[in-house]
Image (cartoon, helix red, strand yellow):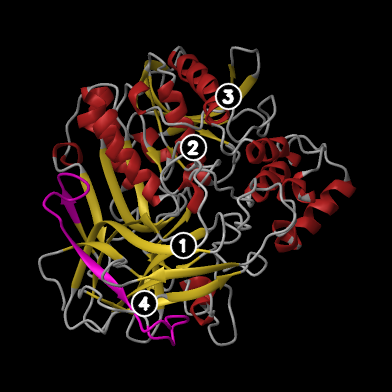
Amino acid sequence: MRENIKILYDIPVTMRDGTVLYCDVYRPDNEKKYPAIVNRTPYLKDNINPLSGYMHAHKLAARGYNVVIQDVRGSANSEGILDPSGHQDEDGFDTIEAIAAMEWCDGNVGMMGESYHGFSQLAAARAQPPHLKAICPFQTSWTKFPAVYGFGIFSPVLFFWIYGRAFDNEKYHPVLSEETKRVMKKYLKDSEEQLRFRPLKDMPAACMDEIPMLSFQRELLENITSIDYLKEIGRTEGFEQVQVPAFELTGWNDFLRDETIYNYVQFKKRGGNERVRKGGRLIVGPWQHGDVLSDSLLGQYFGEEAGGDAIDISGKIADWYDFWIKGKDSEFMSGNPVHLFVMGINQWRTEKDWPVPDTCYKKMYLHSEGHSNTMKGDGRLSWDRPGDESEDCYTYDPDNPVPSEIKSTKEYPYAAVTQDQRVNENRDDVLVYTTEPLNGELEIIGPVEAYIYASSSAADTDYVCKLIDVWEDGTAFCLMKKLVRARYRNGRKEELLEPGKIYEYRIPVGNTAIVLKKGHALRMEITSSLFPDADCNLNTGGRAGYEVAGKKAEQKIFHCEEYPSCIVLPVGKNVSK
């Protein structure tokens, strides 16, 4: 029988420095003590989110939990200044311990939430609060804000997020002048002009002193390659410090998919104890980033079992905490730990691990007669190793970068929905390699890696690889993409290029689970920019964000007997020839 729910509003929690943060609590309508599940949010605790998406605070409360939604430091009525990264370890620790001592809590605390909420859990767990029992860090990473695409790569779109939080907070504490708000709206409207500003460090949209949060964006750019700084703001890994098990969730179309899966794998390898290393769970659906786990996305319907509500994600969160806090077993906790949605055939399957044990990896090679530019070129993908073939060439101009988000055109009016890559594939600076239409099904389940042999006329440059499912009608649906900055091709040590020298780049393009149907084709793109999600490499070898002018780079991609560029696919037993 479902219990009635009551809500406790604006419960104060005091941090170690005296700052007071406020929480709303959804709980059974009685006087008993229950465990707590904490969500720390910068997106306002009193909006609809706690009752929507996968969270369903009322449903979790009905399962016998206090669901605590806290406005983080500097959000809504919580005191202090919102910092996209700082104070997470300390505030997380203090919040967990304060909630555990509340009169309505039985002393056991868990956490849940995606993205920012997920990082806040990782940080809190690293701080090891004694009353924290388990976490659910969905769709997240340790390093989200410093570098979505890799070490040393800056994402200039951060000011969008900061503006959003500043406008949110105006509803509670109006502090911005009308002129400041007018200018902010102008910068948002003219965002592309701002993102192209050079030097990037002086972008006017990020240099408004009236918005204290913007100092984080400037400091981050200044220290984007400083490990000491990243440690100081908590943006470095801490798997070994975490003492509580983690339930991970992401989607194949989530921009933090690979980081979330990486977390699951690394907790198994490096977690702070056996519970962490052996107790985790991973769910990957067909979803995009966010708390609404829809059964439809990018012009595709994945079936009635694809949505988060259909597979009862909130129920699985409750099963997770029933196990770790209340000692109750369930089918979710007793079965295989990895739950995967396989696109193409639209089926769920469970596995013992990720990557799936006994996966077969096979190389698919790049081919052309030296003219793979655009989708109308002669670039091909096949299982055959290349022989004597000419390299492909293109010019990367940082003043004309390839966009990371496809915009609608008259020819492709739904490009923004489907992310149909054909708009980009009409560009001469995009190399396109495509298989023949498949004679049968091709199963790809696991991590995909590219081995690319390339030379550049520049001392530093970028390379972007994309893997694409080409439908029978020609729609080119992007499965994954990855950018690598050449100077950090071997890790965090800076190594500039010798212009004209051929280097091998091992690029972890991403993870997927899909069965390509007969008649589909597999495509690989190579280019040198992913703007504005990643800052444009100016090809000079200079300091990112501090230079005014860039220069063009002449890029060559090699695929021959000596330099066999390829993509390594995790394929099933039935490999289409």
Q: What element carries label 4?
A: strand
Q: What stretch is highlighted in magenta?
A: 349-378
Q: Which of marks 1 and 3 is nearer the N terminus?
A: 3
Q: What residue type is labelled 2?
A: His
Q: In this view, does 142 lie to the left or right of 308?
A: right
What mark, if any, has residue 117 been given in the picture?
Answer: 2
Q: Position of residue 146 (x, y in %)?
A: 55, 40
Say if residue 420 shows up in the picture.
Answer: no
Dot 2 crowding, Cα within 10 Å, few <14, some 14–19, many 20+: many
Q: In this view, does 511 lie above or below 223?
A: below
Image quadrant containing the N terminus: top left
Q: Position of residue 304 (x, y in %)?
A: 29, 65
Q: Which of 459 and 436 is in front in this view?
A: 459
- Residue bearing mark 1: 464
Image quadrant where residue 443 sits: bottom left
**Which mark, residue 433?**
4
Sequence-wise, the earlier of marks 3 and 4 is 3
**Residue 87 - label:** 3
Marks 4 and 1, Cα distance to the nearest angstrom? 14 Å
Q: Label 1 near label 4: C-beta < 8 Å?
A: no
Mark-to-mark CA distance, 1 and 2: 29 Å
The kind of residue on which mark 3 rests is His
Q: Which residue is drawn at 64% across and 13% down?
A: 17
Q: Contact, CB < 8 Å: mark 3 with mark 4?
A: no
Instruction: Point out the tag, 2 or 3, that comes first from the N-terminus.
Output: 3
